[in-house]
Amino acid sequence: MDDTEKYGQAYEAKHVHEVYEEIADHFSGTRYKPWPIVERFLQSLPDGSVGLDIGCGNGKYLLVNRDVFIIASDRSSNLVRIAAKHAPHAALVADTLSLPHRAGTFDFAISIAMIHHLSTTERRVEAIAGILELLMAQNGKALIYVWALEQRDSRRGWDKGEAQDVLVPWVLKDQKGKQSKGKDRKENNNDVNENDLEEKVYQRYYHLFREGELEDNIVAAGGTVLESGYEKDNWWAIAAPANHD
Amino acid sequence: MKILTLNFLTCARKTCKSSPAAFPLHPRDAELEIVETEFNALFIQNILPRVEWDALKGLCTELGLTNVPPEAPEPKELFDTSIKSAGIDEKEKEPTQLTRDLHNLLLETTIQSGKLVCGNCGHEYAIKEGIANFLLPSHMV
Ligand SMILES: [Zn+2]
């Protein structure tokens, strides 16, 4: 492991893994509505398909199709505990870059809002290559979904030309039991009332993808892009191993 | 952790992944529990061709489970083919006891706690409260 790799890992441990572990319950309370593209992808699978949900979070996509079998994984054991409740699927704790599965065995994979938490291009490409490797060479396919830089109309208002590596605060209001509420905000630490002991701010790292970057990463990972597009502040692509039919 | 899940797992270490000895992982000190879940006979029928039967039999022997058929069941064994149910819709066919037993074995029999051991490198992955943890210490990645 070289130094950049080590640094990337340590950085993600602080700004991604620890944060999700802390905010798991609040995060889960706000993440229940599946994105249409993901829903369509999962519902289009033949019954009995076997696949992976990599970076499953609370497992909201495990509710979409009960006629396929999904092995979901996430680094946060607090989130996996929630995800594990969705039959007939399975959930386990694993690292995206060291998944406990055999190459060439799965019909499909989804990786929703996960790759953008990896802090270097090398690690993002490595993650995509790792996912493609687990798919069946002939007809396996993966849906990858990441946050877009181009989201002028969102409340965060980022757009083309701006910095792509950002920290996004998650404000956790709690402790004394009243108005327990977690939410995303673009404002940074300074806007939080220092005297308000009931607020805790966690900084989550994101790499915002520019147009075409996800497709470039898939090709760099040795894959083929079958379909791609933009959906509500996110870029998505359906990728396959290069020797796909 | 369901028995079915073990069919799709191997060691998380890169050096083990392509080794035949790393599949399946071997349960050790396993505490089993039956967790009831909705019965879906077509799910069992569809998933069956994906199950590596010899690996499953080995795992079950290690776990002390004895109700595993010696060969992978044929699709025709999963539904009642008597005159009564002939000619009716696929979805209304009556599943056999074998299908119910497979549902019980693959989806309802779970490892609540214990370890999964890699047959190639010997690394042990813990299962706690039904959830397996495959995070590796950084020197093993
Ligand atoms: Zn191993």
Image (spheres, rainbow, N blue to C red):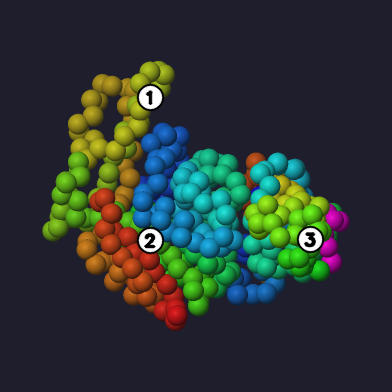
The percent coordinates of residue B23 (x first, y second) are 68, 68
Work out how far the residue at label 1 is from the one at label 2, CA to CA, in angstroms. 32 Å
The image's mark for residue B81 is 3
Q: Is residue B34 above or below residue A108?
A: above
Ligand 1: does it lie within 8 Å of the C-beta at label 3? Answer: no
Q: Nearer the viewer, residue A24 or B77?
A: B77
Q: Is residue B120 above or below residue B94?
A: below
The percent coordinates of residue B123 (x first, y second) are 66, 61
Work out how far the residue at label 1 is from the one at label 3, CA to CA, in angstroms. 57 Å
Furthest residue in direction left, as rendered: A161
Q: Secondary structure at mark 1?
A: loop
Mark 3 is on which residue type?
Thr
The image's mark for residue B69 is none
Mark 2 is on which residue type?
Ile
Mark 1 is on which residue type?
Ser
Work out how far the residue at label 3 is from the one at label 2, CA to CA, in angstroms. 43 Å
Figure quadrant of the C terminus of chain A:
bottom left
Figure quadrant of the N terminus of chain A:
bottom left
Q: Residue at x 20, y 45 (%)?
A: A154
Q: Residue at x 45, y 53 (%)?
A: A55
The percent coordinates of residue A182 (x first, y second) are 35, 32
Q: Nearer the viewer, residue A19 or B81?
A: B81
Residue under label 1, please give it.
Answer: A180
Q: Secondary structure at mark 3?
A: loop
Please check the rendered image and state whether residue A175 is part of the magenta-colored stretch, yes or no: no
Between tags 3 and 2, which lies in front?
3
To the question of a shared chain for discs 1 and 2, the answer is yes
Which residue range is magenta in the image?
Answer: B65-70
Between tags 1 and 2, which lies in front?
2
**Is residue A100 shown to the viewer in this render?**
no
